[in-house]
Each structure stands twice: as C-alpha cells, then as structure tokens.
Amino acid sequence: MTSSTTRARHRAARRPITPLSLLASAASENVVAVGKRSAIVAASSGLLVSLMAAAPASAAPVHSDAAVSTVDVAALTTEARAALSTAPTVTVAADASWTVEQSDISVTPAPEPVKVRTVAAASRTAERTALTTATATGTSTAAKAAAPAAAAPATVAPASAAGSSIIDIASRYVGVPYVSGGSTPSGFDCSGLTSYVFAQAGISLPRTSGAQASAGTVIPRDQAQPGDLIASPGHIAIYAGGNTQIDAPKPGKTVQFREIWQSNPVFIRIG
C-alpha cells in the first residue's frame, strides 16, 4: 500500500485591509489621474485625510481643454449637482460686439472761498486810516483855533493909518522877505525898509537904525501919528496907528503889519 503525504498549502500573509487603507489607496489613484488637490473623508473611522497630491515628477503637466473642463461629478454635493444640472447654457457668437452708451459729463468748479480775513483786514485798515485822518484833521483844526490872531501877518494897513502917504507906500512891500543888509524890494532888513519907503516919499534917511533914531524929533507916544518912526535898541519900524506898526522883523519872516511888541519904544517924527 502506497501512502502519500500531502502538505498543506497556506496563503502568504498580507497587510491587513482596513477602511483607512482602502481610502488612502483610492485617494492616491484619484490624485494621479486628476492631478489636483483632493479631500477624502473617512466616515467610518471619523478621520479626515487631506492630501496634496502632485503628479509624478516624470509626468508632464496637463494643459488640455479636456482636463480643464473635466468635472468630478461624483465628488460634488447633492446641492452642487442639482445647480449644475439646471444651469443654463450660454452661447456667444464669435463675431459678437458690445455697445456701451456714454453721456457727456459736465464739470462745474466749486466756487472760490471768500477771503474773509483779507476783507476784514482791509476793513480794519480803512478804519484806522479814517481814524488817523480824522484825528490829524481835528488836531490841525484845534491848533488853528488856538493860535492867536496876531500870529498871522496882516497884509492890509489898519484904518487908523488912512491918509498917511508913508503907510500907503510901505504897504506895497508887505510879504517881501527879510534879508540882512537888504534895502530893495527883493529883500529888506529893518532900516533898509524904512530908508527905502521914505526915499519914495522924497525924504532921505540915514542907512542904519541907530542913525535914523537920531535923525528926527522924539515925541510922546500919545502924540504919535501914522508914518512916524518907532525906535528900540537894534531895531526900527514905522508907526501905523493904534497899537500897530509895519516893519521887516527878522530872518525867516517877511514885511508885515503887526502889534507893537517893544516894551519901551521911542517915537520919532521926521521933518
């Protein structure tokens, strides 16, 4: 009797297959085929496996229109699949043209701001100018009002001198400037005026004031008449009646009628 021995044959041991390994294998295959980022949810184990899959280095990048337009419908949610199925298809002709209506635009510049400060400053300047002018005018008027009447030179002989030929001749030279040593109508000093006026009347007088004071007769003041001389130390004038005289005062002044200012004058009658 022949006996045979049959050995038992056993399968080779394999890696245990779990839901996670199946998902990983499927995700790897999907990554190679599509070449984009995939997210796989393992519902059975409650794990989220996110893989950034890239094509093998030897694989060339896919740029075809078919690859771009391919949509993995199986990976879409129910709402996304419903929206995709009902989306309208839009077809545009190759020679389509677009028309855009344009309207003219008018631009109105904003009004320039009012220069309030400049106007106010100009107003204040005008007020100050007016105030200064008014003050100056008021001061000038007050000064003129306060000035004594005797300060203005008299140009007309007083009524008390009426009938005097000497005063009549002397009044012709009112306004002639005082000139030291002058004895003509271009300029007189005190004795130059008296000698020139009396010469016009045909009466000769010495040239100096001291000599003229000795050329006539001394008379009391109450007897003096217009045309007599009034002598004081270093000065000579012509009496014009009342309390007035005509003379050539001093440098800077002119021949004029004015009040007798000498404190103790001597009255002299010529002829």
Image (cartoon, grey):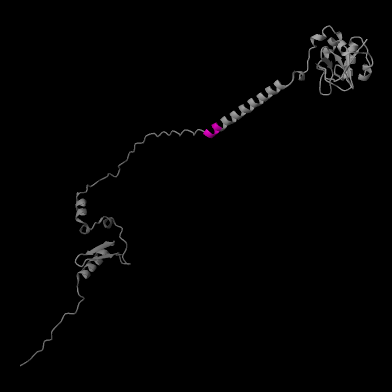
Task: Name the side, left or right, on which 243 lies relative to 1.
Answer: right
Observer-nearest of 46 and 169: 169
Is 117 colored magenta in this rendering?
Answer: yes
Question: Which residue corresponds to the image point at 20% horizontal and 69% vertical from the top-left?
Answer: 19
Residue furthest top in the image: 163
Task: Name the side, left or right, on which 177 lies relative to 65.
Answer: right
| Residue 202 image-quadrant placement | top right
The N terminus: image quadrant: bottom left
Observer-nearest of 70 and 258: 258
Q: Which region is colored magenta?
A: 116-120
Q: Position of residue 258 (x, y in %)?
A: 80, 17
Observer-nearest of 209 and 204: 209
Q: Position of residue 112 (x, y in %)?
A: 49, 33
| Residue 35 image-quadrant placement | bottom left
Q: Position of residue 174 (x, y in %)?
A: 81, 15
Question: Which residue corresponds to the image point at 86% horizontal and 11% vertical from the top-left?
Answer: 222
Residue furthest left in the image: 1
Q: Position of residue 70 (x, y in %)?
A: 25, 56
| Residue 151 image-quadrant placement | top right
Is 63 colored magenta in this rendering?
Answer: no
Identify whether 213 is placed above or below 61: above
What secondary structure is the magenta-colored segment mainly?
helix
Observer-nearest of 199 and 250: 250
Identify whether 264 is placed above or below 11: above
Identify whether 100 is placed above or below 251: below
